[in-house]
Amino acid sequence: MDQLLFVLAGHAVTVAEFAAGAAALAFLLLVAVLLAVSRQARARAYEAEEQARRAEELEDRLIELARNQSETAGRVQSMGETLAHRQSELARAVAERLDATSYRMGESLARANEATHENLMRLNERLALVDQARASLGELSGQVMSLRETLANKQARGAFGEGRLQAIIADALPRETFAFQHTLANGRRADCAVFLPGDARPLLIDSKFPLEAITAFRESAAPEARRQAETRLKQDVGKHIADIAERYLVAGETQDVALMFVPSESVYADLHEHFDEIIQRAFRARVVLVSPSLLMLAVQVVQAIAKDARMREQADRIRAECGALVEDVKRLRERVGNLSRHFAQASEDVAQALTSADKIARRGGRIAQLEFSDPPEAPGAGAELRGAAE
């Protein structure tokens, strides 16, 4: 038993030690096998219990499913009966609705027929109005053609522009501040002259305008015709600007600028949009192009200047009136002070009178109640009475 078998890590292992180790190892293996078998047995028992529980649950579910199926069959049967009842009610309601709808539709058709008849009557009336409007439009077209013929004539067109100018000036300015067909010292006659306050030189306005060139420019479609119309327009307007500058700008007699009235806002807009060199030429020649709206604005400026001049003329009178007003206020202040003192004296007198009235009222009350008090003694009366008593 003590026979040496091998040496392990410097230790001599004998047969007895080897046998003891083998026995211990076998014991450990046996214990491990027993534990594994016990664990497998418990696992199988748990699985068996789980399968039994699942079988019970499956049986319960089958029972519940059978019960639900029977309830569902009953509900389906009752639902079928309800649906049949509802279907019969729906058929009856649909029949009633169809009858009511047919009745209402008949009434609606009758009302629609009446409304259509009324609308046709109104349409006939409106057609009569349209016929009248067409006749009026024909008359208006004739008037427009007459206006076009009038504007085609140079003299008539000049009269039209002059009429607009006179209407604007006469409506806005006092009669003494303007003059139509004003004649200058050189014999030239201006369409309108506006006299500014404090200045004897009038502002001259010319109402004639070369409309043929702008009409040709607007109606030209081909590029070559448009260029020719543009050249003609520049020449005509430039010549008219030069004529105004030559005739109406007289040193010492007229203002330094003159106005050329363009009687159409659209024509004025076309000049500013397409012919800026004409505007610059007029500016250099001291001729200002104005449309009806700009002329109204210029007239308002003249009104403001005239008002300011009248204010300056009346400044001394206004100052004198203000001084007199201040003196009146001072006198009013003195008189109000005197009146205040009189009121204070009157208030004091009224207070004293009220005091006397209160005393009289109290004395009268005592007399009415027979409440008399002893009169006050004289200064020597008490001594005499005391001497007599002694």
Image (tube, helix red, strand yellow):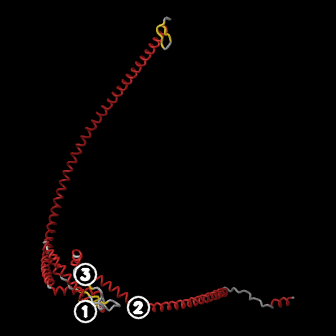
Q: Is residue 197 above or below residue 54?
A: below
Q: Label 3: few (<14), some or many (≥20) within 10 Å? A: many
- The three-letter amino acid code for the residue at tag 1 is His
Q: Nearer the viewer, residue 61 or 145?
A: 145
Q: Residue 136 vs residue 41: left or right?
A: left
Which residue is labeled 2 in the image? 314
Ranked by sequence position, the earlier of labels 2 and 1 is 1
Give amino acid for label 2: Gln
Among the 4 quarters of the image, the one containing residue 277? bottom left
First reached walking from the N terminus: tag 2 or tag 3: 3
Q: Nearer the viewer, mark 2 or mark 1?
A: 1
Is label 1 in a helix, a strand or a loop?
strand
Give residue 65's quadrant in the image: top left
In this picture, residue 387 sits left or right of residue 47: right
Extreme residue in the right direction:
390
Q: Which mark is residue 282?
A: 3
Q: In front: mark 1 or mark 3?
A: 3
- Dot 2: element: loop
Q: Secondary structure at mark 3?
A: helix
Q: Foreground mark, 2 or 3?
A: 3
Residue situated in front as seen by the camera: 234 or 312:
234
Q: Quadrant of residue 297?
A: bottom left
* Marks 2/3: CA–CA distance: 38 Å
Quarter containing the C terminus: bottom right
Q: Looking at the picture, which amino acid does disc 3 mark?
A: Ala
- Residue in view at x 50 percent, y 91 percent: 327
Mark 2 surroundings within 10 Å by alpha-carbon count, few (fewer than 14), some (14 through 19), many (20 or more): few
Answer few, some or many: residues within 10 Å of disc 1's Cα (few below 14, many 20 plus, some between 14 and 19): some
Frontmost residue, 325 versus 201: 201
Q: Which residue is identified by label 1?
A: 182
Picture coordinates of residue 263, whole percent (x, y): 22, 82
Q: CA distance from mark 2 to mark 1?
A: 30 Å
